[in-house]
Amino acid sequence: MQTLSINAVRYEALFVSALQRSDHPNAGDVRAAITRAVREFGRRGCAERVAQEFGDHPETAIVRMRWARSTVDGTFTAVRPGSRLVRLSASSVAACAA
């Protein structure tokens, strides 16, 4: 039996959702879009639609999946209690490198 990570399901669900990069979605928008897609298509249905898009339009599917993966990873970043997550702006990184 093949196991699938929760993030893999999230990637596919966001990929097939109506949410677009140009919508500039926040975390709530992303979570809602994933939930709607899984409810509408199911896990398998999302995977089937991803496969169809990669077959029909591989150039655009690659870009969309890259966006979906990045967005899901950013939305569902796990932070353990007691750990510190520090996000630096580009100017902060440039200042440190100078």
Image: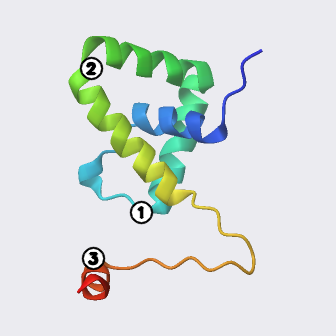
Badge 2: residue crowd in 10 Å (few <14, some 14–19, many ≥20): few
State the separation of the CA atoms marked 2 and 1.
27 Å
In the image, residue 70 sits, relative to residue 62, either above or below, namely below
- Label 2 sits on a secondary structure element that is helix
Residue ID at (59%, 19%): 44
- Which numbered dot is residue 76? none
Cβ atoms under marks 1 and 3 closer than 8 Å: no
The residue singled out by tag 2 in the image is: 58
In the image, residue 18 sits, relative to residue 50, either above or below, namely below
> Which of the two discs, 2 and 3, labels the residue nearer the N terminus?
2
Badge 1: residue crowd in 10 Å (few <14, some 14–19, many ≥20): few
Q: Position of residue 41 (x, y in %)?
A: 55, 24
To which quarter of the image does residue 56 belong?
Answer: top left
- Type of amino acid at the residue the image marks with label 1: Asn
Q: Position of residue 67 (x, y in %)?
A: 34, 45
Residue closer to the observer: 2 or 95: 95
